[in-house]
Amino acid sequence: MIPKGRRAASCWAKRRREGKTMGAFRHLMLAAALLTGAAPVVAQDARMTPMAAPAEPGAIALKTGGVSGSTAPEAWFSQYGVAMTRNVSTATLTPFLPDPAKATGAAVIVAPGGGFLMLSMENEGWRVAKAFAARGVAAFVLKYRLKPTPAGMPQFEQAVGAMFASAGRADSRLKPEDAVAGLSDQIADARAAFALVRSRAAEWRVDPARVGMIGFSAGAMTTMAVALAAPELKPAFIAPIYGSMEAVSVPADAPPMFAALASDDPLFAHKGFGLIDSWQKANRPVEFHLYEHGGHGFGLGKQGTTSTGWFAAMMQWLDTSGLLTRR
C-alpha cells in the first residue's frame, strides 16, 4: 500500500505534468491562431473545434480543378469563435456587393490567410469584405485551393504545430519570387476570380479597370504572386497586409501598392522593408503603414492598438488615388 503522503505527492506531480502539457498545447494553439488570422479580440477557447459548414450564399465555383493528392473532404472548424476551413479543393468566389446608391465602381478580391493549410474565412474574408461593401467597394472573397491536410482533427493540429515550429526560421520560408512556383493553384484561382468579376462587371456595377486585390499573410503572398507572375491581370491596386517584406523584382507596370504590418509581427517584422524599397526603386506608387503593436493575424485591427487604423487609411489612399471616383 502506497503511503498517503506519497499518493498525494504522486497525484500532484501527475497534475503538474498534465498542466504543463495542456499549457504547451494552449500556447501552441495560440501561436497557430496568431499565424493564421484566428487571433481573438477577447480571450476565448483556443481549441480547434469541428463545426458544420456554414451557409455561403452566393458562392460561385470557379471551376479551376481540384488539388493533387487531396483525399480528405473540405472541413470547417472554429477557433476563438472564428470560422475557418481546410482541405479546400474547389475554389469559390463570394460577392459582397454595396448598396447601389453607395457603389463607387471599385472592386477588390479578398484573399484570406492561413499558411496554405487553412483559410481564416471569417476574420480575414467575410468581415473585411463587408467593411469594403459598406464603403461602396464591391468585395469578393476568394476561397482558394489549399494543401491537403489529414482528415482527423488531432492529426491536423499536429500539421499546424509543425508549420508553427518552422515558421519562425528564416531558412524555412521561400522568398516571394521563389514561392511563386509553388502557388500555381492559387494563381489560377486568382486569374479565374478576376475573369469572373470582369465578365459580370455590368451586373455587379463594377468598373473592370478598377478591380484590385488584398490579401492577409498567406493571402498576401497570393496577392504578390498575382502581381509578379500574372501581370496581364492588371490589378488596379494590390494590398499585402502583414505579408513578407522581402525584396522582389518589380514589373515595369506593377500596380500601386498599399501595405501594412505590425512591428511586433512574429513572422515578418525586424527583417527590413525590401518590398517597399523595391516598389520605390521601380518608381511605382506605394504606401506603407507600420504599426507599433498588432502582432500577426489582426484582420481589421487588434483592439487597443493603432493597427485598427489601417482600413480607414487604405480607404483614404484609394480615394485620393482616384480609385473611388464614380464614373
Image (cartoon, rainbow, N blue to C red):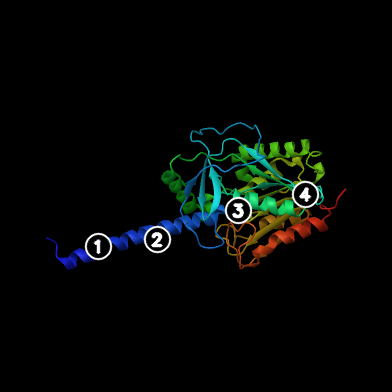
Specify the amino acid type for callout 3.
Asn
Under tag 3, what secondary structure? helix
Q: Residue at x 70, y 39 (%)?
A: 193
Q: How far apart are marks 4 and 2 (CA)?
A: 47 Å
Quadrant (top left/top right/bottom left/bottom right) for the N terminus: bottom left
Compare marks 3 and 2 and give the one earlier in the sequence: 2
Q: How far apart are marks 3 and 2 (CA)?
A: 25 Å
In front of the other: 289 or 78: 78
Question: Distance of mark 1 from mark 2, alpha carbons?
Answer: 18 Å
Pointer 3 local density, CA inside 10 Å: few below 14, some 14–19, many at least 20: many
Mark 1 or 4, closer to the camera: 4
Q: Residues within 10 Å of mark 2 (few under 14, many from 20)?
A: few
Give the residue at mark 2: 23
Residue corresponding to mark 3: 123
From what the image shows, is residue 69 above or below residue 112? above
Q: Which of marks 1 and 4 is nearer the N terminus?
A: 1
Quarter of the image holding residue 59? Answer: top right
How far apart are the alpha carbons under marks 3 and 1?
41 Å
Residue type at mark 1?
Answer: Cys
Type of the residue with mark 4: Asp
Q: Position of residue 108 (x, y in %)?
A: 73, 47
SS under mark 4: loop
Residue 220 shows up from this direction: no
Taking depth in this image into account, of 270 and 149 the one nearest to the observer is 149
Mark 3 vs mark 4, foreground winner is: 4
Q: Nearer the viewer, mark 4 or mark 2?
A: 4
The disc label shown at residue 11, or none? 1
Residue denoted by label 4: 99
Label located before the other in sequence (3 or 4): 4
